[in-house]
Image (cartoon, helix red, strand yellow):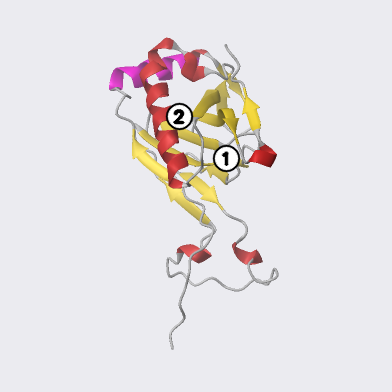
Amino acid sequence: MPLDLYDLFPKTIAVTQLNSLSESLCLSAIKEIERDLVSGNPGDGSFTQNQQLLDLSFFAPVKKEILELCGEFCKAYSHAIDRLHICNSWGNKVSQGDSIRTHKHTNSYISGSFYLTDGSGFSLVDYERSNLFGGFTTEILPDGNMRASESFHINPQIGRIIFFPAGLMHSVMPNNTSKPRYSVAFNVIPVGEFGRVTARMNIVAAQG
């Protein structure tokens, strides 16, 4: 008899297009990012000093849409969350030859980014695929099987946004063109009262 296969414990991500991100808003955002950039580690791109970028007034409709989409993402996981708060947000610039190293946001709930330009790809990484059977590794066949995939690549497009669990490793691939790649990244946490009875929390969002 054939095996009955059950895909358990998935790491679900979400991708869509922002309706509120206009061409003029993209240009305003890029101008603001350029004005506020600081360098990170060598070859690791640059980012804005302002870590509350989405609090700028021209981003108000985008911020509202992001929070609504985050709510839908929570529902996809069947999480009982009433309110969400963007705890930090910043602009990224990846110039020619730069990338952004593999990392994760361990102090957050949902992470995400959206793109002001196209450019080098965004990668989600799962290093656990070789640990499923006691740490034994084997050659992975190039058959596109997502159960054996170590990484998943998304090509940036203007207005495209991605949401993923904050603990998922991710990176930006090297920019091999002369055109800078601009994006806005953010982290989201639940606020108010949530959690099981014996693990109840009440987080108050900081007022900026």
| x and y percentages locating residue 54 in the rendered image | 47, 19
* Rendering quarter of residue 42: top right
**Circle 1: residue type:** Ala
User: Looking at the image, which is closer to me, 201 or 58?
Assistant: 201
Per the image, is 173 magenta? Answer: no
| x and y percentages locating residue 73 in the rendered image | 44, 40
Q: Which residue was labeled with disc 2?
A: 183
| x and y percentages locating residue 14 in the rendered image | 42, 44
Is 16 rendered above or below residue 56? below
The first of marks 1 and 2 along the sequence is 1
**Circle 2: residue type:** Ser
Magenta-tinted stretch: 23-34
Q: Which residue was labeled with disc 1?
A: 166
Residue at left offset 51%, top offset 61%: 149
Residue at left offset 45%, top offset 50%: 153
The quadrant in which the C terminus is found is top right
How many C-alpha atoms fall within 10 Å of the one at disc 1: few (<14), some, or many (≥20)? many
In this orientation, does residue 123 appear? yes
